[in-house]
Amino acid sequence: MPIAFTYTLIVLLFITSILLTLLILLHRGKGGGMSSMFGGGVTSSLAGSSVAEKNLDRYTVLVGIVWFACIVGLGLWLRVTQSGG
């Protein structure tokens, strides 16, 4: 595999790691965790979730899949280079 492919995967992994962290932090807390310990559980939750929350869920899953694919791709590349291929 060309070395440019590896650098592309590393840059994509770095970007998706930052995006995944930010997207996870944007999610609303469901209570019972650290957020409720510091007063985050005081607010009442609405019965349904909004379109923005559903889109945030979709984007988080999409970025998570891309992040996982980068991890698997780098692992396969490492296996190929270690075996001498």
Image (cartoon, rainbow, N blue to C red):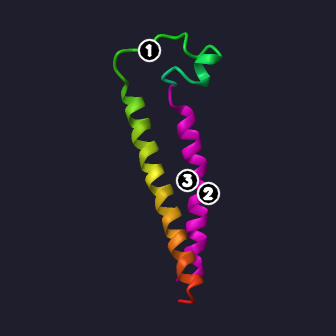
Task: State the residue position of label 1.
Answer: 45
Which of pointers 1 and 3 lies earlier in the amino acid sequence? 3
Give the SS element for disc 3. helix
Q: Quadrant of residue 4?
A: bottom right
Residue 26 shown in magenta: yes
Report the Cα–Cα distance between label 2 and label 1.
34 Å
Coordinates of residue 42 in the picture (x, y in percent)? 55, 10
Amino acid type at circle 1 is: Ser
Q: Which residue is mark 2?
A: 14
Q: The magenta stretch spans which residues? A: 1-28
> Is 52 located above or below residue 21 in the figure?
above
- Is residue 51 shown in magenta? no
Pair 1/3: label in front = 1
Q: Which residue is mark 3?
A: 16
Left or right: where 24 falls relative to 37: left
Q: Residue at x 46, y 62 (%)?
A: 69
Give neighbour class at mark 3: few <14, some 14-19, many 20+ (Cα, 10 Å).
many
Helix or strand or loop: what does disc 2 sit on? helix
Q: Amino acid at mark 3?
A: Thr
Give percent across and percent down for residue 24.
54, 38
Q: Quadrant of residue 54?
A: top left
